[in-house]
Image (tube, rainbow, N blue to C red):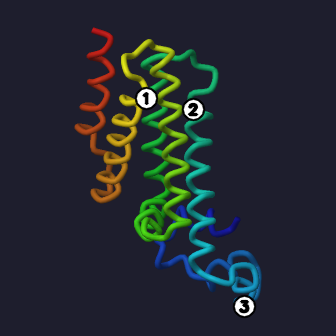
């Protein structure tokens, strides 16, 4: 999808139907033929961008044995993939009150939480499902804070990772 590529270099407000059609080599009215409503387009774009984030995380940790290092790498990959796609945060904020958009977000967050739960179970961590929810919430908050700040926030990442390291202790 051309829009997915453009979303890496343009803000949500810049990502207009005209720009998308121009980059795709299509006439301007083609957008409305494919996407009769803007909100449907934005839902689909959010889903595709979040799937890219998930795929990036999976690629980064594939072949690694379960463990703290793999869990940390998954979180780092998630945060970096989100930073590389600032439109994800803008779409998430815009669509959080849209029932279908909210469902996309909940689905992807549930997937990340499940991945974390499975990792924590493999480590025999106490209460892995509950801890996975808490670590997922912290990771999402870090992603949000980094988006707002426009940069990596090492103190937040270090603090989260300290909890993993403390468990080893």
Across and down, in percent, residue 12 comes to: 48, 73
Please tell me which residue is depicted at 47% across the width and 66% down the height of the picture.
91
- Check the picture and name the quadrant holding the C terminus: top left
Distance of label 3 from label 1 (alpha carbons): 48 Å
Please tell me which residue is depicted at 44% across the width and 20% down the height of the picture.
69
Please tell me which residue is depicted at 39% across the width and 16% down the height of the picture.
125
Relative to residue 116, is residue 93 depicted above or below? below
Across and down, in percent, residue 101 comes to: 53, 65
Relative to residue 126, is residue 76 depicted above or below? below
Query: Callout 1 environment at 10 Å: few (<14), some (14 to 19), or many (20+)?
Result: some
Q: Residue 29 shows which numbered tag?
A: 3
Mark 2 in CB contact with mark 3 (< 8 angstroms): no
Q: Earlier in the sequence, mark 2 or mark 3?
A: 3
Query: Callout 3 environment at 10 Å: few (<14), some (14 to 19), or many (20+)?
Result: few
- Element carrying mark 1: helix
Q: Residue 69 shows which numbered tag?
A: none
- For the residue pair 97 and 39, the one nearer the viewer reads as 97
**Image quadrant of residue 79?**
top left
- Check the picture and name the quadrant holding the N terminus: bottom right
Q: Would residue 110 appear left or right of 133 to someone viewing this image?
A: right
- Element carrying mark 2: helix
Q: Would residue 47 appear left or right of 23 to someone viewing this image?
A: left
Q: Residue 60 shows which numbered tag?
A: 2
Q: Would residue 109 appear left or right of 28 to someone viewing this image?
A: left
Q: Would residue 134 appear left or right of 14 to someone viewing this image?
A: left
């Amino acid at each position: 999808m051309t829009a997915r590529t453009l979303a890496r270099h343009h803000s949500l407000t810049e990502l207009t139907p005209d720009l998308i059609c121009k980059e795709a080599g299509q006439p301007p009215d083609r957008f409305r033929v494919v996407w009769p409503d803007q909100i449907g387009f934005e839902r689909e774009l959010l889903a595709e961008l979040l799937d890219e984030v998930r795929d990036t995380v999976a690629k980064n940790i594939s072949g690694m044995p379960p463990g703290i290092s793999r869990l940390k790498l998954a979180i780092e990959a998630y945060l970096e993939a989100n930073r590389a796609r600032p439109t994800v945060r803008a779409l998430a904020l815009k669509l959080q009150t849209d029932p279908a958009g909210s469902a996309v977000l909940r689905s992807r967050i549930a997937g990340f939480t499940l991945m974390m739960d499975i990792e924590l179970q493999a480590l025999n961590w106490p209460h892995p499902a509950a801890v996975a929810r808490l670590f997922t919430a912290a990771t999402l908050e870090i992603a949000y804070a980094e988006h707002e700040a426009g940069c990596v926030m090492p103190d937040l990442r270090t603090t989260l990772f300290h909890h993993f390291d403390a468990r080893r202790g």
